[in-house]
Image (spheres, grey):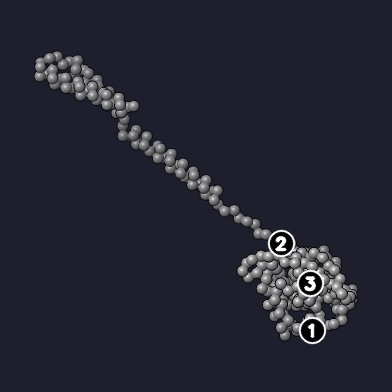
Amino acid sequence: MRDEIVGILTLIFLGAVAYILYALVRKKPVKKAAIVALVSFIAAVLATPSNETKQHVTAQPQNQSSKSIQEKTEKSQIVERPQKRGKKHYPFPKLASIEDKPTGTLVSFLDSWRAKDWDRMYNLCQETWKSEHPKNGGGKEFLKNSYGIYQLLGAEILKKSPGPLEGFYNIKTKLYLKDISGEIKEENKTFTVVCEIAPYRPVSPDIGKCGVNPLSGMP
């Protein structure tokens, strides 16, 4: 709008100047035309926007645009920021709360597996099996090779039932296993726990030492 006004005033000024030149040639009065030219010139100068005003008007939308882009970027960063996942906890029976001797022996066996304590795990095996597989004659190495390929993350005791002979117990479990590729799976395994006073001599848990037959629950 201001530019249009300046244009009109400029035309008036130019018209007045042209009339003054014509009047001077024809020797006519030029006072009114001179006044019109002067007034229109001053008005046009006052109406013309300064460079600072133009720069301010031009820069303001740019600043607003930059601010808007920055706000959108910050919001985008807040939305896209990944959330940290908490570490999953797997169940595991508490040995202190288990009064049953065969079940407690199996829980200790599983805890040794979870800790990769092969010496302790071997000591918790069945007496008959240990007599056939000496610790330094391949017994300990067998446990490491058979059970060590999986990481035991957790376990649950599902059911205990008596076996075919005195001192034999079958204990069903649920195992949470992680293999060498990182895959996690659940498996139900039944371990056989045998209580003996000597190899091949099963007895009641009240008398003998209970041990896990490692072949029964191999993953």
Residue drawn at (71%, 65%), measured in percent from left and top? Answer: 186
Q: Earlier in the sequence, mark 3 or mark 1?
A: 1
Q: Mark 2, residues whose alpha carbon is within 10 Å: few (<14), some, or many (≥20)?
A: few
Secondary structure, mark 3, is strand
Tell me what residue is drawn at x 75 percent, y 64 percent: 92
Q: Say left or right for 57 vs 69.
A: left
Labelled disc at residue 191: 3
Q: Position of residue 4 (x, y in %)?
A: 30, 26
Q: Is residue 169 above or below residue 135?
A: above
Residue at 82 percent across and 71 percent down: it is: 170
Q: Is residue 71 left or right of residue 185?
A: left
For marks 2 and 1, give the CA distance. Answer: 34 Å
Distance between mark 2 and mark 3 Cα atoms: 20 Å
**Residue 174, numbered label:** none
Q: Which residue is mark 2?
A: 90
Q: Residue 131: give its label.
A: 1
Mark-to-mark CA distance, 3 and 1: 19 Å
Q: Amino acid at mark 1?
A: Ser
